[in-house]
Image (cartoon, rainbow, N blue to C red):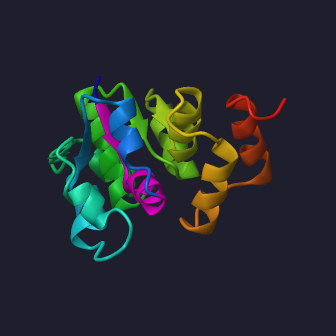
């Protein structure tokens, strides 16, 4: 499988100590564009994700500077989002890991399958990798400063089988 990630998923999962779930879900590894590497690792300093992503042998960095769709995407999205979507399209990615609403919408409009932080955590709950999704989502909001609407929180718990 070819998986591309934007910075948001990597940072959010790192903040709660759950970045390894990405590797468990996609054991062949993931690809990130240079803008995501810069944002998370080089400019990340001591923030969540900098050390974790920088030391992950299962994350590969690719150049997207020659992608013909990059200028169009940069008109609407930030650099990391634009490069992630361009890279996903260029390599024919099976999935793009991205959280931001506008970026998700853009990725879907280009025919990409989208998965975000909450989706990874739902998978982890279903796969028995985490015991309780509610706890993970609460930690994500409290420690990771992750914005999660009430309806999405409830839908995630329903999908994970924690509420009916």
- Asked which quadrant contains residue 91, the reply is top left
**Residue at screen point 29% across, 23% down:** 1
Q: Of residues 76 and 39, which is closer to you in this image?
A: 39
Is 3 left, or right, of 110 in this rendering? left
**Residue at screen point 23% across, 41% down:** 68
Q: Of residues 67 and 98, which is closer to you in this image?
A: 98
- Check the image and report above or below for 85 versus 45: above
Q: Which residues are magenta?
A: 3-16
- Check the image and report above or below for 72 versus 2: below
Is 144 left, or right, of 18 in this rendering? right
Please identify the residue farthest to the right as the structure is shown.
164
Residue 147 appears in the rendering: no
Q: Whole-percent x and y of residue 22?
A: 38, 40
**Residue at screen point 69% across, 47% down:** 134
Q: Of residues 71 and 106, which is closer to you in this image?
A: 106
Q: Of residues 22 and 32, which is closer to you in this image?
A: 22
Q: Whole-percent x and y of residue 13?
A: 45, 53
Q: Main secondary structure of the magenta part?
A: helix
């Amino acid at each position: 499988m070819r998986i591309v990630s934007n910075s948001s998923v990597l940072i959010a999962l790192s903040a709660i100590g759950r970045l390894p779930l990405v590797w468990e879900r996609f054991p062949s590894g993931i690809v990130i564009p240079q803008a995501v590497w810069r944002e998370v690792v080089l400019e990340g300093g001591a923030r969540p994700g900098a050390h974790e992503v920088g030391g992950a042998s299962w994350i590969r960095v690719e150049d997207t500077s020659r992608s013909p769709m990059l200028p169009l995407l940069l008109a609407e999205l930030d650099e990391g989002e634009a490069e992630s979507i361009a890279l996903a399209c260029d390599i024919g990615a099976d999935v793009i890991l991205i959280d931001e609403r506008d970026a998700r919408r853009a990725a879907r409009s280009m025919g990409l399958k989208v998965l975000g932080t909450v989706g990874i955590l739902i998978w982890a709950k279903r796969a028995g990798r985490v015991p309780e999704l509610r706890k993970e989502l609460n930690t994500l909001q409290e420690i990771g400063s992750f914005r999660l609407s009430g309806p999405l929180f409830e839908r995630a718990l329903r999908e994970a089988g924690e509420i009916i």
